[in-house]
Image (tube, rainbow, N blue to C red):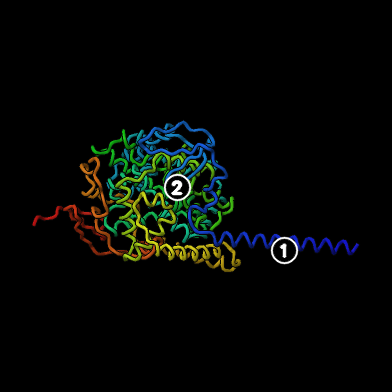
C-alpha cells in the first residue's frame, strides 16, 4: 500500500517537474523571441487559403469569401463574417456626430469658449427658457440627459480593470500609442487631410507637443481616480467623463469649421471626423495598444485583461460620439476585424502621410542620433512594408540598439506584470500611478481644456489642399525644434512644462507663424519681401 502511494507521489512530482520545465521553456522562448510584428501570435494565420487577395484604394474591391487570405502592407488576416466591405463602410463617412453638431448649432460657440461649461450652464439653469427657444432648450437637456445615463452594457468592474491594464503597462502603452497609433495613423490619407487642414499636428514643434499633451491629459483623466471618485462616472460629472466630452466638442468644432470651407470636398473625402474616422481612432487607442503590448512582451495579455481594456474604450467611444451600431469595441475579435476592414478601406500612405509622419518624428527628436533611433523603432512597430511606404530610412546599426532597448522594455514589462514577484509589481504600479497623477496635476494647472484655439496655418490653405499631384515634404512644414528624448517623455514633459515665451519661425513657404504660449494663440503674417 505504502509502496503504491510512494510511487504515485513520485509520479506526481515528476509530472509537476515536467510542467515546470515546459513552462520555463515556453517563457524563455517567449522572452527571447524577436520583438517585431511578425512574431505577434494574434496576427499570425493558422492556415492560409489558396486565394491571397490585396487591392489599392483605386482598385475595385474583389468578391470576398469567408476564409480568403487578405494582406496589405505586411498585415495578413483571414476574411470572416465580422469583416466589413467597402460598400458597408463608405456610408459611415457621411455620418458625423448629430448629437454634438446639434448642441453646437444651438450654442454657436467661439473658438476660445469652454463649450462644456456653456452646455451645463444653459441646460441646468432654470431660466434657460428665457434665453433660448423651447426646442433649443430641449436639444441641450436631451444631450446632457442621454450622456449622463449609463448604457446597460457598461460593467464598471471591467472598466476599472481596463484602467489598471493601462497603468500597469504604462511605458509600453505610451510607445504603442505614439509609433503604431499616431505615426501609423498618418497612413490614412483622409484622416491626414483633417490634420493638415486644421494644423492640429502639422504646426511648429511646441504646438504639436501641446496637442499631444492635451491627448495625454485626456487619457490621464480617464485612467486615474481622484479620492475614490470614479473619473468616468457621469452622475458625479467625473473629470474623465468631462475630458472626453471636451475632446468630442473639439472634434465637433473642427467638423463645423471645415464644412464651412469651400475647399472641403465632402462628396470625395466624407464629413470631417465622421463615424469611420472616429471608429478608427478608437481602435488606435484600444486594439492597437494591445498589439503593441503583445509585441513588446512577447506574449498576449490574458483574455480577461484584453476584454476589460477593450470594454474600457468601448465606453469612452460611446461618450465620444461613436454611435453604438458602429462602435467596434464590442470585444477583441470585433475590434480586430473592424481594424482590418478599415485598413483595407482607407490605409494607403500618400505624400501628405509621409510629410506629417516625418514632421512628427522630427518634432519629438532632440538630435540626429535620436531621430535615427526613432526611425528604427518606428519600423519595428509598423513593419518594414508600411515603414517603406512612409519612406522611413533604415539604419542597420541602429536596429541592434533598438532591439536591445525593446528587450530591456520587455524585461520591465514582465516585472510590471508580476513575473519577478508581487512586491516589485506593486511598487511599479504605484510608480506609474504617481507619474500619471503628477502629469495630471500639471496639466490641470496649465488649463488643458481642448479648445479650438487657432485657425489652420496658412501653409495648408484652400489652394494647396485642392491642388492635385503636389508633392509635399517635411521641408514645407514649420521647422521643428528639439524638445525631448523619448515619445512618452515628450508627452510627460509637455504636461510638466508651461511654456511662457513666444517663438517665431519662418518656413520655406514665405509665411511667418508666431506661436504665443502666454494666451495660446497663433498669428500668421506674410514674410516681408527682401
Q: Nearest the camera: 427 or 10?
A: 10
Residue farthest right in this picture: 1
CA distance separating discs 1 and 2:
40 Å
Q: Toward the viewer: 190 or 62?
A: 62
Judged left or right of residue 76, residue 453 is: left
Q: Position of residue 321 (x, y in %)?
A: 42, 42
What residue sits 59% from the left and 50% below the top? 303
Q: Secondary structure at mark 1?
A: helix
Position in image of residue 499 (x %, y %) = 29, 64
User: Does 89 sit above or below residue 329?
Assistant: above
On the rendered image, what quadrant is the N terminus found in? bottom right
Q: Is residue 262 left or right of residue 409?
A: left
Comparing 461 with 50, the one in front is 50
Return the x and y of residue 268 as percentages of the image width and height: 31, 35
Tell me if 191 is positioned left or right of 21 in this view.
Answer: left
Q: Write down the quadrant of residue 25 in the picture.
A: bottom right
Note whether 288 is above or below 407 in the view shown: above
As drawn, 9 above or below 141: below
Most distant residue in the front direction: 50
Residue sitting at the far left: 530
Residue under numbered circle 2: 74
For discs 1 and 2, the disc positioned in front in the rendered view: 2
SS under mark 2: loop
Residue drawn at 37 percent across, 43 percent down: 348
Q: Residues within 10 Å of mark 2 (few under 14, many from 20)?
A: few
Residue at numbered disc 1: 17
Quadrant where the C terminus lies?
Answer: bottom left
Of the image marks 1 and 2, the number of the one nearer the N terminus:
1
Amino acid at each position: 500500500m505504502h509502496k503504491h502511494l510512494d510511487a504515485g507521489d513520485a509520479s506526481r512530482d515528476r509530472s509537476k517537474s515536467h510542467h515546470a520545465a515546459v513552462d520555463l521553456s515556453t517563457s524563455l522562448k517567449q522572452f527571447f523571441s524577436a520583438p517585431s510584428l511578425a512574431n505577434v501570435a494574434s496576427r499570425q494565420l493558422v492556415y492560409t487559403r489558396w486565394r491571397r487577395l490585396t487591392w489599392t484604394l483605386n482598385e475595385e474591391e474583389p468578391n470576398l469569401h469567408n476564409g480568403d487570405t487578405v494582406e496589405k502592407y505586411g498585415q495578413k488576416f483571414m476574411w470572416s463574417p465580422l469583416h466589413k466591405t467597402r460598400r458597408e463602410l463608405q456610408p459611415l463617412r457621411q455620418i458625423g456626430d448629430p448629437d454634438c453638431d446639434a448642441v453646437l448649432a444651438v450654442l454657436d460657440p467661439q473658438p476660445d469658449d469652454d463649450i462644456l461649461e456653456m452646455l451645463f450652464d444653459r441646460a441646468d439653469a432654470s431660466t434657460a427658457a428665457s434665453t433660448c427657444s423651447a426646442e433649443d432648450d430641449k436639444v441641450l437637456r436631451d444631450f446632457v440627459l442621454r450622456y449622463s445615463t449609463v448604457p446597460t452594457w457598461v460593467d464598471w468592474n471591467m472598466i476599472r480593470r481596463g484602467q489598471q491594464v493601462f497603468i500597469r503597462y504604462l511605458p509600453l502603452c505610451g510607445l504603442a500609442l505614439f509609433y503604431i497609433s499616431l505615426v501609423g495613423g498618418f497612413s490614412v490619407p483622409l484622416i491626414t487631410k483633417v490634420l493638415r487642414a486644421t494644423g492640429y499636428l502639422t504646426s511648429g514643434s511646441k504646438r504639436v507637443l501641446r496637442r499631444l499633451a492635451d491627448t495625454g491629459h485626456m487619457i490621464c483623466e480617464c485612467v486615474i481616480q481622484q479620492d475614490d471618485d470614479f473619473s468616468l462616472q457621469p452622475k458625479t460629472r467625473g473629470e474623465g467623463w468631462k475630458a472626453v466630452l471636451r475632446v468630442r466638442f473639439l472634434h465637433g468644432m473642427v467638423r463645423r469649421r471645415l464644412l464651412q470651407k469651400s475647399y472641403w470636398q465632402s462628396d470625395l473625402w466624407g464629413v470631417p471626423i465622421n463615424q469611420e474616422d472616429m471608429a478608427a481612432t478608437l481602435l488606435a487607442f484600444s486594439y492597437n495598444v494591445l498589439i503593441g503590448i503583445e509585441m513588446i512582451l512577447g506574449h498576449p495579455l490574458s483574455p480577461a485583461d484584453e476584454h476589460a481594456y477593450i470594454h474600457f474604450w468601448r465606453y469612452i467611444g460611446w461618450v465620444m460620439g461613436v454611435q453604438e451600431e458602429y462602435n467596434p469595441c464590442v470585444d477583441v475579435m470585433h475590434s480586430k476585424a473592424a481594424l482590418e476592414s478599415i485598413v483595407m478601406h482607407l490605409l494607403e500612405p500618400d505624400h501628405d502621410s509621409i510629410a506629417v509622419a516625418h514632421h512628427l518624428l522630427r518634432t519629438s527628436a532632440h538630435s540626429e542620433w535620436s531621430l535615427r533611433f526613432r526611425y528604427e523603432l518606428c519600423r519595428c512597430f509598423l513593419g518594414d512594408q508600411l515603414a517603406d511606404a512612409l519612406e522611413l530610412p533604415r539604419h542597420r546599426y541602429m536596429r541592434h540598439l533598438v532591439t536591445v532597448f525593446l528587450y530591456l522594455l520587455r524585461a520591465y514589462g514582465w516585472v510590471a506584470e508580476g513575473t519577478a514577484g508581487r512586491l516589485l509589481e506593486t511598487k511599479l504600479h504605484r510608480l506609474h500611478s504617481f507619474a500619471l497623477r503628477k502629469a495630471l496635476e500639471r496639466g490641470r494647472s496649465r488649463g488643458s481644456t481642448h479648445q479650438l484655439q487657432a485657425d489652420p496655418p496658412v501653409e495648408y490653405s484652400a489652394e494647396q489642399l485642392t491642388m492635385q499631384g503636389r508633392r509635399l515634404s517635411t521641408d514645407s512644414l514649420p521647422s521643428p525644434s528639439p524638445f525631448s528624448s523619448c515619445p512618452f517623455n515628450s508627452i510627460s514633459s509637455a504636461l510638466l512644462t508651461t511654456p511662457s515665451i513666444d517663438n517665431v519661425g519662418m518656413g520655406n513657404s514665405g509665411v511667418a507663424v508666431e506661436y504665443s504660449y502666454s494666451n495660446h494663440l497663433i498669428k500668421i503674417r506674410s514674410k516681408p519681401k527682401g
